[in-house]
Image (tube, rainbow, N blue to C red):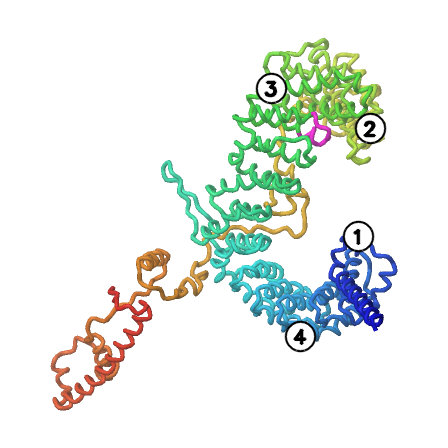
């Protein structure tokens, strides 16, 4: 007997231990320590094969595990659409977690399997009346995600139902479903606009952002729908979710520039007064606290509002927020710099004292370095140009070719913006050229250093050309010194063999030809500087190989051929200019004729056309330029003075770098194009200001006309303070005034009860006494009527006194204190 009891006890203990182990394993399967949290993503093939059996199982645990595995496979890019029929059967599961995962699966594959998805529409419609707001919202998401045109009517009805839901989360889902329904059937636009109008009147900030998204998708031009909601949207702006604030700010900015008058600035003596519309001021005041948002997109949207809608004095409020978010991340910094490029170009004084925040760092991306250089150029003025010039010179040693080019060109821009620093800029550019030419040993060891040196020299030559041209225009009779334009040209002419970049070599040849006859230059041949013929001699030896000159890697082959032809074109022009200056020198004539002969038989048709044009110009000076008699020409033959006018004059204009250089002159901030530098579809168009604005009464809602009644409060010092506050806010407080005597009340009641007296009160009061005495009433009748009226009035007065006392007791909390007006 003892053995039987012992065996039963042992068996029961083993069963209990197994059940405890199964229960513990079931409840801790998601917290597996041995396999880790990512074990569901690394499932073996046998687990994948069992997904179908698990979906058909009666156990919710098995179904949940199968759905988790399906979602994991979807996240890895696997196609699991073959399980669609088995998943649809579980759409009405009582387990909330299973239904969530089923809805996620259906959102992914409902478009690919519309016929099978239609089988579950009845379930979705039932779920729209579920007690859980999460289920109602997800059911609407799936129903709007089934892109079948035949159910568009059902989707619109479901949207209307959910738009009136008590839960703001469901109303938000209804707003997000509106663009899907409009994309499915554009004919439903009137019905959807009515739903959007209802959602814009929503009191919950949770659904306002989604309603704005639906508005921008369905009817972006119907700004008239916002008239009555504009002021309320401005006030509720701070409570909307972050991304909803971005959409709402952009919408309110469009409304303000379309419907509100533009801020005006008037100068009265030494003071400046700004006139800003009250509704526009409300938008600026409501959006100003959002500059402290943690979301950089919200801050940038506020900056856009202040920059395009605020008066000039309010633009300074965007300085610190932009500088704050610039260091959030590299991606945000890239966008902020694109904003600053436009803002600093229009109003550089805002950031002129903050130029140190834009100094280039070594670990900055290449595009960020270029943008910082451009921003610092916009901020360059008399006070900070020395520090910025040193920064640009340091950036010329960067490892990126484009950054080096921008830095060298920035040095030249400093000289044009601040003319007093021109000698310093020329000295810096000449130092770049000389120091790079002195690195012959290092360039032999490191080829990359040689390429870097060529880039710096080439850009320095291009900048020097513009600076020299400007200086010679200002003062062509300046004495020759180490930094004079002629000495710089002489130095470049000596180094022409070391300059490899085609465009830089072409600039040197143009300078030599243009200023070889400048006064002050030493001459061996009459009228020609002594270093000019030697440059032509060097170029004539390498004329045929100029097309193969090395160019930057980012240029195409076709562009390479064109860049090489630039040197040939300038060599031909140099030969014509030198021969024109001294046509009597035999050696110079032979050299110029040799160069023109090379151009006549060149493979490039541009070079051949240039040679033909120059020969036609010089035919009146020397008919035998090419060593043989020129053919008879029917055109007009020019004299030497006329040819000099053609080749030398009219070349003094310097084209300044304009906004079109960066392609940002017409693109508003907030567009993707200012970041990419290319035109992008979908960029928002900033509307122009309306001349006088619309009537502000159109924006007057019921809340402005009939303020919301406040709950009754006890009369105290606090209530008097609140009454003053309400009075200042434009809300008239309710004041109880007891009647002093019953005479006015009796007269009013008699005028409304006696028709004769009522009509007599509206008649002409200037009638004579004889006319009024003609209507006689007997004294007995008057007394009876007076007695009847007095009895009725006494009853009414008693009832009125009782009702007034009850109202006073309700308002004052039962106290007998009377308020007098």
| Disc 2 from disc 4: Cα separation | 77 Å
Q: Which mark is residue 547?
A: 2
| Disc 1 from disc 4: Cα separation | 42 Å
**Relative to 72, is 224 on the left or the right?**
left
User: Is disc 3 surrounded by few (<14), some (14 to 19) or many (20+) residues within 10 Å?
Assistant: some
Q: What residue would you read off at disc 1?
A: 34
| Disc 3 from disc 1: Cα separation | 70 Å
| Disc 1 from disc 2: Cα separation | 68 Å
Q: Is residue 252 above or below residue 172?
A: above
User: Is disc 2 surrounded by few (<14), some (14 to 19) or many (20+) residues within 10 Å?
Assistant: some
Magenta stretch?
397-406
Q: Is residue 131 above or below residue 526?
A: below
Q: What residue would you read off at disc 4?
A: 126
Disc nearest the viewer among 2 and 4:
4
Give the mark, 3 or 1, whose residue is nearer the N terminus.
1
**Relative to 581, is 549 on the left or the right?**
right
Q: Which mark is residue 424?
A: 3
Q: Which mark is residue 805?
A: none
Residue at the (76%, 28%) spot, across then down: 566
Q: Position of residue 568 (x, y in %)?
A: 79, 26
Q: Position of residue 625 (x, y in %)?
A: 80, 20
Give the mark, 4 or 3, whose residue is nearer the N terminus.
4
**Relative to 615, is 468 on the left or the right?**
left
| Disc 2 from disc 3: Cα separation | 35 Å
Q: Considering the numbered disc 1 on the image, is that residue within a helix, a strand or a loop? A: loop
Q: Considering the numbered disc 4 on the image, is that residue within a helix, a strand or a loop? A: helix
């Amino acid at each position: 007997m003892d053995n039987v009891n012992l065996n039963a006890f042992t068996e029961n203990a083993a069963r209990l231990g197994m059940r405890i182990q199964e229960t513990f394993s079931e409840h801790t399967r998601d917290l597996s320590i041995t396999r880790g949290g990512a074990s569901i993503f690394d499932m073996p093939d046998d687990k994948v094969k069992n997904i179908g059996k698990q979906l058909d199982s009666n156990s919710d645990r098995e179904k949940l595990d199968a759905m988790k595995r399906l979602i994991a496979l979807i996240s890895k890019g696997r196609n699991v659409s073959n399980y669609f029929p088995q998943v649809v059967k579980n759409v009405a599961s009582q387990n909330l977690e299973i239904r969530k995962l089923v809805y996620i699966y259906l959102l992914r594959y409902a478009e690919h399997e519309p016929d099978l998805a239609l089988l579950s529409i009845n379930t979705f419609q039932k779920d729209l009346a579920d007690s859980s707001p999460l289920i109602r919202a997800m059911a609407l998401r799936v129903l709007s995600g089934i892109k079948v045109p035949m159910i568009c009517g059902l989707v619109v009805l479901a949207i209307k139902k959910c738009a009136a839901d008590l839960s703001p989360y469901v109303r938000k889902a209804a707003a997000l479903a509106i663009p899907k329904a409009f994309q499915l059937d554009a004919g439903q636009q009137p019905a959807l606009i009515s739903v959007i109008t209802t959602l814009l009147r929503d009191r919950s900030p949770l659904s306002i952002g989604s309603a704005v998204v639906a508005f921008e998708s369905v009817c972006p031009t119907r700004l008239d729908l916002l008239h009555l909601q504009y002021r309320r949207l401005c006030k509720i702006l701070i409570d909307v979710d972050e991304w909803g604030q971005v959409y709402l700010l952009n919408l309110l900015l469009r409304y303000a520039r379309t419907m509100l008058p533009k801020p005006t600035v008037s100068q009265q003596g030494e003071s400046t007064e700004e006139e800003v519309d009250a509704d526009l001021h409300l938008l600026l005041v409501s959006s100003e606290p959002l500059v402290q948002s943690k979301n950089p997109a919200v801050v940038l949207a506020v900056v856009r509002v202040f920059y395009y809608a605020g008066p000039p004095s309010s633009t300074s409020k965007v300085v610190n927020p932009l500088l704050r978010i610039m260091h959030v991340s590299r991606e945000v910094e890239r966008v902020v710099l694109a904003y600053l490029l436009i803002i600093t170009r229009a109003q550089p004084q805002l950031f002129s004292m903050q130029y140190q925040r834009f100094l280039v760092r070594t670990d900055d991306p290449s595009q960020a370095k270029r943008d910082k250089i451009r921003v610092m150029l916009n901020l360059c003025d008399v006070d900070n140009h020395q520090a910025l010039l040193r920064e640009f010179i340091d950036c010329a040693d960067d490892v990126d070719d484009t950054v080096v080019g921008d830095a060298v060109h920035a040095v030249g821009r400093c000289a044009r913006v601040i003319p007093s620093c021109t000698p310093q800029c020329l000295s810096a550019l000449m130092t770049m050229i000389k120091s790079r030419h002195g690195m012959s040993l290092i360039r032999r060891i490191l080829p990359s250093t040689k390429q870097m040196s060529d880039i710096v020299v080439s850009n320095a030559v291009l900048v020097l050309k513009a600076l020299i041209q400007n200086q010679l225009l200002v003062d062509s009779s300046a004495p020759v010194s180490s930094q004079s334009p002629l000495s710089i040209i002489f130095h470049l002419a000596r180094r022409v063999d070391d300059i490899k970049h085609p465009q830089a070599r072409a600039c040197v040849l143009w300078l030599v030809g243009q200023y070889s006859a400048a006064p002050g230059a030493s001459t061996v041949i009459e009228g020609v500087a002594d270093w000019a013929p030697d440059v032509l001699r060097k170029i004539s030896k390498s004329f045929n190989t100029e097309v193969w000159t090395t160019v930057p890697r980012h240029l195409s082959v076709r562009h390479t051929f064109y860049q090489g032809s630039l040197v040939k074109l300038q060599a031909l022009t140099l030969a014509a200019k030198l021969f024109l200056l001294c046509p009597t020198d035999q050696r110079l004539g032979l050299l110029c004729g040799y160069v023109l002969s090379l151009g006549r038989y060149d493979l490039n048709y541009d070079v051949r056309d240039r040679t033909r044009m120059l020969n036609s110009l010089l035919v009146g000076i020397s008919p035998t330029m090419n060593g043989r008699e020129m053919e008879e020409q029917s055109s007009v033959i020019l004299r030497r003075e006329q040819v000099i006018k053609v080749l030398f004059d009219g070349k003094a204009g310097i084209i300044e770098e304009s906004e079109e250089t960066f392609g940002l002159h017409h693109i508003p901030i907030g567009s993707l194009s200012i970041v990419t530098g290319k035109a992008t579809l979908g960029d928002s168009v900033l509307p122009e200001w309306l001349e006088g604005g619309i009537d502000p009464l159109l924006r007057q809602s019921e809340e402005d006309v009939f303020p919301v009644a406040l709950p009754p409060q006890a009369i105290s010092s606090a209530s008097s303070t609140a009454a003053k506050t309400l009075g200042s806010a434009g809300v008239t407080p309710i004041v109880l005034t007891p009647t002093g005597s019953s005479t006015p009340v009796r007269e009013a009641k008699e005028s409304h009860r006696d028709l004769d007296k009522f009509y007599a009160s509206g008649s002409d009061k200037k009638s004579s006494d004889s006319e009024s005495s003609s209507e006689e009433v007997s004294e007995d009748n008057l007394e009876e009527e007076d007695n009847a009226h007095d009895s009725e009035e006494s009853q009414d007065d008693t009832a009125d006194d009782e009702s007034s006392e009850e109202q006073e007791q309700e308002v004052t909390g039962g106290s007998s204190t009377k308020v007098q007006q």
